[in-house]
Every structure is written in structure tokens, then in C-alpha cells.
Amino acid sequence: MSKNFPILVVDDDDRMRELLVEIFSDQGHQVIAASDGDTAIRAILENKFSLIVTDLKMPKQDGMAIVRQAKAVDAELPIIMITGHGSVNSAIEAMKQGAYDYIEKPFDPEQLKLVANRALRYYQLIRKNRMMNSTLNDLRSHELIGGGSAMQKVKRLVAKIAPLDVSVMIQGETGTGKELVARLVHRNSRRAGNLFLPINCGAIAVNLLESELFGHEQGAFTGADQQKKGLVELASAGTLFLDELNSMPAAFQAKILRFLQDRSFFRVGGGKELRSDVRIVAATNVNLAEEVAAGRFRDDLYFRLSVMVLRLPPLRERPEDIPELACYFLRKYSSLYEKKVDRIDPYTLNQLVDHPWPGNIRELENVISSSVIMTTGTAITSASLPDDFRRGNLVTAVEDSMKLSDMEQTMMRKALQRSAGNKARAARMLGIDTSTLWRKIKRYGL
């Protein structure tokens, strides 16, 4: 975990305040200190903090007032209350009001560090989830772009599956948007107000996967210097997304199966049985039924996770959606790169539609992003496309030159008909300048 977080410490006792500053500064954090509640509240309004550590009993405004103000600014901001022995009931009341935890005086600095690190880790997860949800909200206009039959089927299935509290298996090639669909399932479920946590099963070493999912106790193995909650526990009441499920080691599949059967688990090195009410959404880019038949994946786990199956079509099976997707990414990256690129010329759009897209939507997004950067005018043209894309399409372009020529002539004829022969208006409809239209009219003898 990063050790560079902004922390506010509040205490009217000079020695205690200096001790708190020293504890967190030694860990590398940015610490702001306040000697009373009024100063602390001003600091909360003027700065962004990842953690607040405050005394409960103080003159003017006490720790409870700080909790209320901090929660009004950021409902998820963790607050640790420091209290004397006789004020434990008040500290518990503060937790009911939203404080993360409390610690009694006198305390061991190591104990405070442990509680603070947990609080910071919790807040990191909350912020990550916020950021992902914010990104998802930005993408609402293209949640599942496409009016073709393939995507209409996917949309109908998502609408039916999301409210049902069952496990879901999403199948699709790399780049088809499996995590996006998993997030949509979560956001349209009764768990939408809780965490959505993803984990790539193929990107984590076998010996660390169990700890990541189920957590570990302090001293469970070398380097486990404190207790850690796993994603299964953190996502309780929310959704856990297991990506690249087919990469899960065979030895670990039995442990996931056991959890799915009764929702119970043990942290690594722990003897206490824990439970978690988490929904599992899994994804794979291979045919898992074939993996089962080949003995590389447990059939009982496969059936547990495949209560409902969503298949995402590759982009080559939905070419009718490519123009809409391309225009979405054009708007996105034109805004991101602050460039006034607002269209794709018709010939280039035909090239995009005809491309086989082995990398699916992810590849299309990369091509449009690169093209926006390379474009010098207001329209993406063939010259703007990445070199790899153009080389890959050279043979196809030669083979299809007659087809593309015919399409171009057809589009020009329609534009001229709709504009009643007005060349300037027809050029605007086609997204080209008038001189280009005149040259093409002469070339094709229209």
C-alpha cells in the first residue's frame, strides 16, 4: 500500500498531537494537525483527506462534531476516534454515526498504525470503486452500444439476469467488454449500492491467489505482518468479478467450489470460519465446456458458476454497430485530447466496417484513439489510421476496391439527389469539402 496519504490529526493536548504527527509522518504520510474542533472543521472544508484521527473530548467542537462535518463532505471518509476509558460508550455512538473505529488511551502506537492502515486500505478500495463507477457513468451513453440483433439479445439477457441473485458466467473473446457487462449486471441488481470488486485470476501468482480472495491472518506466512481481509470478505453484500476464470489453478478450484456451496471460508492461517454474502460473476475467453471435457476445469465448479450464461459476440459478428462505436470513441478521445476532430470520412468508415477486428472493441478503441492523435484536420481519414491497421488491410483494400468504389459512387449519388444537385450541400452531407466532391464526380463521370 502507498504510504503517502493526507491525514488530519486532531487533539487539544499538545503532547498527544505531536505524538500522532510523529507516528504518521514516520510512515511517510502528509499530516495536518489541528488543536481544536473549529480548526479541524476548517481544514476538512479546505483539504481532501484520506483519514482523520481525532480525540473525542475537546473544547468548542468535539469529535462527534468532526464526524458529522467530515461525513457531510465525504460519507466514506474513515475516522478513527481516540477516547479515554470512561468514554467508550461515546466512541461507540460515534461509530454508529459513521466513525470507522476507535482506540482507547493509553494506546500502543503499533496498534494505532494497524487500525489506520486498515482504514486507509478500506478507503482506497472505496475510492477505486467510486472511480470505476464514475467511469461507468461516463460510459452510460455506450453501455452496450449497438442496435443489431446480437447486442439486442445481450441487452435483454442483462435486464433479465441482473435482478436475480444468481451466479453469472460471461463468455466472450478478449476485448468484447466482459467487465463492462459484469458492472452493468451489478449496477442493475439489488447489490448496486455495495462494492463491485474485480480480480484477474490469470494475473496473480498461485501462492497469492488464496490470500487475495480469502485474506490472511497476521503471521500466516513470511511478509504477513498484519491481518488482511480478502476480496470475498470486502465485497460481502456486493459483487465479486472473477475474470479469466479459465486461468484459475486446478488446486484452487476446489476452494472456490467449497465457498460457493455454503458461502463460508477461512483466512489463510486462520481457524475461524467466516461467511460472506457476495454475488459471483465470472468471465472466460475460452470455451469452458471444452476445458471441462479436457479435464482442465472442474465440471462441478463450472455448473455452479454457469447458472446463467451470457455470450458476448465478437465485433466481426456485429459490423452494423461499428459506426456507432467508432463515433462514440471519436467523441471520447477528441474531448480527452482537446482536439476538434468531429467526424470520420465515409471511405475510412467503410475501412473500419470491413476490418475483421481480432482485438474486438478494445482494438477499435485503440485505433480511434491513435487516429485522433494523428489527425491534423477535423476528420479522421485513411492517412490518420495507424500503420499496422493500414498494412493489415492492404490486401483486403485491393480485393475490395471495386466494392468500395461502388459504395462511394452510390453514396455520392444519394447525396446529390437529396441536395437536389447542390454540390456544397452534398459535400457537407458526405463529410468532405466541395473540391473533393468535384474531383470524384469527374473521376466517376457522374
Image: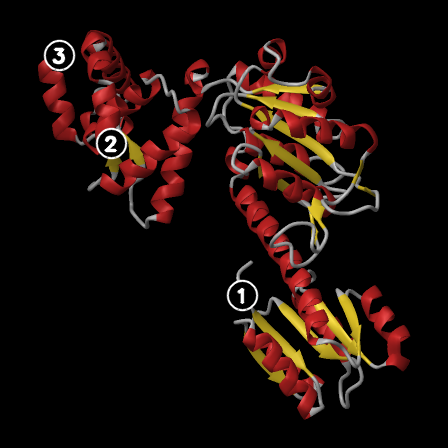
What amino acid type should be assigned to the residue bearing mark 2?
A: Pro
- Image location of residue 188, percent across then percent down: 69, 35
Query: Looking at numbered disc 3 in the image, what kind of residue is underneath it?
Result: Tyr
The residue pinned by badge 2 equals 386
Q: Residues within 10 Å of mark 2 (few under 14, many from 20)?
A: some
Instruction: List x then y, in percent, for residue 239.
Output: 69, 38
For the residues bearing labels 3 and 1, Cβ distance under 8 angstroms:
no
Can you say whether 203 is above or below 5 in the image? above
Please determine whether, in this image, residue 408 is positioned above or below residue 84: above
Above or below, 426 relative to 31 = above
Q: Residue at x 90, y 81 (%)?
A: 86
Percent position of residue 218, x then y: 71, 56
The residue at which mark 1 appears reads as: 3
Single out the residue that lies furthest toward the front. 222
Disc 2 versus disc 1: distance between alpha carbons?
A: 40 Å
User: Image quarter for residue 200?
Assistant: top right
- Tell me the quarter of the picture where residue 107 sits: bottom right
* Identity of the residue drawn at 74% across and 27% down: 257
Disc 2/disc 3 C-alpha distance (Å)? 29 Å
Q: Which mark is residue 444?
A: 3
The residue closer to the viewer here, 170 or 292, is 292
Q: Is residue 121 visible?
A: yes
